[in-house]
């Protein structure tokens, strides 16, 4: 087996080297040597991201290795992308999410919603969809799905018949995968592509998009998509109207006891952090300061270490760093570095000429095409890698065609979260598929319709409503 893996990797590496060093592949080599070098770097990074010959987070360090060979790029500028303010926004978000999980407040909220509203199958479905989407605004989509999965399993195993309610069980599992992806669109920290775009716009076009702007622009769209998801899944099965026995859910909720000190402190921290994000502009004007989203995120995360809980302990302890996905932060920094080199070397300008052919179409058609292609791409590739690669090209396409840059890039980034067809498309899809409750054909059948509905909803929303 080991020999077979080695041979496969050797074949892939040989194939890559043939492409990498083929001189006729680079049509603008003489006029733009830095652009050619950037193209080679991009090819190398995409190849390694797709094949995972080395860890993808290590692949993200390749721009640093290439930096000495660029004539006009300084190493400090390239490395600076790894310490972008948005990287610290994500870091703060990861730590806040960890405190949220450690306090178990998320379990109490999920169970309480079901106790209050989960009287029928229809209500259980809508509770699961909206609870999952709410958590995915603050936690990672993967963590959200892992949180909701055992809750769903317990509900199904103890309240429904495996034979009579098999279709309902399938729909519930699908709902947590889809709603976690949709909910992540609502905040800059909800999913990586959102943060990628915010960092890219800030670094390359001096366009500042803060937490509140993003949330208030995207939340109506997310709410609409969640309602569409509920109606779609509701129509897939005939939900019986008799009352559901909530004894087990109530028992689980009662086991949590009264609201603990950890949960109270976490609630205060979350409310304070969210309030600072929402009212940041007013606070800055009132006190003549320059409060930013990354600063607020780091401040909120710091509170988990300095506010004492029971017996003088803290919610987060000295082992906090073990659960922070440092590999994601490296990947994010490397992607920003790659995107900045694509822009600064002129490679984006050369490549954008290829997609200028769609510039002759009406804007709404262009937006739909971009969103549709993005949604299909992310079924088979990482949405983060897709965002890093295409964001520079689409931003230049918008400028070259005299279109609002956000009207092109926002639907692209939001569509990157719309991967509902394949188990390999996103971790939430893979997690629910691992439950063995349905086959790929079932996910594909439902996912393709949700993909199309989401793409058109995003496209028309961004086209008709004011951008941020």
Image (spheres, rainbow, N blue to C red):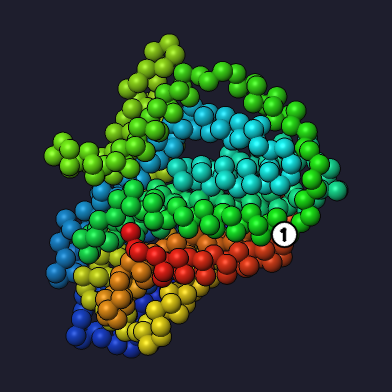
Left or right side of 281 for 431: right
Q: Residue at x 71, y 47 (%)?
A: 122
Tell me the residue at 77%/37% (across/down): 244
| Left or right position of 327 against 398 | right
Q: Nearer the viewer, residue 46 or 406?
A: 406
Judge left or right: residue 433 versus residue 336: right
Q: Could you tell me residue 461's position as x and y percent?
A: 45, 65
Q: Position of residue 223 (x, y in %)?
A: 51, 53
Nearer to the camera, 439 or 463: 463
Dot 1 falls on a residue whose secondary structure is helix
225 is higher (above) or lower (below) than 463: above
Spot the residue most to the top.
311
Q: Quadrant of the rendered structure where residue 331 is?
A: bottom left
**Residue 78, position in %: x, y?**
22, 59
Q: Residue at x 61, y 35 (%)?
A: 113
Q: In this rendering, does residue 327 appear at all? A: no
The residue pinned by badge 1 equals: 235
* Image: 25 above or below 371: below
Note whether 284 is above or below 99 in the view shown. Answer: below
Specify the quadrant that holds the C terminus.
bottom left
Q: Quadrant of residue 424?
A: bottom right
């Amino acid at each position: 087996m080991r020999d077979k893996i080695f041979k496969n990797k050797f074949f892939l590496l040989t194939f890559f080297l043939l492409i990498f060093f083929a001189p006729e592949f680079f049509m603008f080599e003489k006029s733009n040597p830095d652009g050619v070098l950037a193209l080679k770097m991009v090819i190398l990074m995409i190849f390694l991201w797709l094949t995972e010959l080395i860890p993808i987070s290590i692949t993200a360090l390749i721009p640093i290795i290439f930096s000495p060979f660029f004539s006009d790029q300084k190493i400090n500028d390239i490395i600076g992308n790894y310490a972008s303010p948005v990287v610290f926004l994500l870091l703060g978000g990861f730590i806040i999410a960890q405190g949220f999980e450690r306090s178990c407040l998320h379990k109490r909220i999920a169970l309480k919603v079901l106790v209050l509203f989960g009287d029928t199958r229809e209500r259980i479905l809508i509770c699961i969809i909206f609870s999952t989407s709410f958590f995915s605004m603050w936690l990672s989509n993967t963590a959200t799905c892992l949180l909701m999965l055992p809750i769903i399993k317990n509900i199904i195993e103890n309240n429904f018949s495996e034979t009579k309610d098999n279709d309902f069980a399938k729909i519930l599992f699908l709902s947590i995968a889809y709603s976690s992806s949709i909910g992540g669109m609502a905040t800059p920290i909800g999913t990586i592509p959102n943060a990628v775009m915010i960092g890219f716009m800030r670094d390359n076009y001096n366009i500042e998009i803060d937490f509140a702007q993003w949330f208030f622009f995207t939340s109506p769209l997310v709410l609409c998509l969640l309602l569409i998801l509920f109606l779609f899944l509701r129509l897939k099965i005939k939900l019986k109207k008799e009352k559901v026995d909530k004894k087990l859910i109530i028992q689980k909720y009662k086991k949590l006891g009264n609201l603990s000190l950890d949960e109270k402190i976490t609630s205060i921290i979350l409310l304070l952090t969210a309030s600072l994000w929402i009212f940041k502009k007013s606070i800055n004007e009132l006190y003549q300061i320059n409060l930013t989203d990354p600063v607020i995120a780091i401040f909120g995360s710091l509170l988990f270490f300095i506010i004492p809980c029971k017996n003088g302990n803290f919610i987060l302890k000295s082992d906090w760093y073990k659960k922070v996905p440092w590999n994601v932060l490296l990947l994010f920094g490397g992607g920003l570095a790659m995107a900045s080199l694509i822009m600064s070397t002129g490679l984006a300008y050369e490549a954008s000429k290829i997609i200028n052919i769609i510039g002759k179409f009406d804007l709404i058609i262009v937006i739909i095409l971009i969103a549709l292609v993005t949604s299909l791409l992310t079924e088979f590739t990482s949405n983060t890698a897709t965002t890093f690669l295409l964001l520079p090209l689409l931003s230049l396409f918008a400028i070259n065609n005299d279109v609002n840059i956000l009207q092109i890039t926002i639907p692209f980034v939001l569509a990157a979260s719309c991967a509902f067809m394949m188990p390999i498309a996103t971790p939430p899809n893979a997690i629910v598929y691992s439950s063995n409750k349905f086959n790929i054909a079932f996910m594909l059948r439902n996912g393709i319709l949700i993909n199309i509905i989401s793409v058109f909803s995003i496209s028309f929303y961004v086209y008709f409503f004011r951008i941020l």
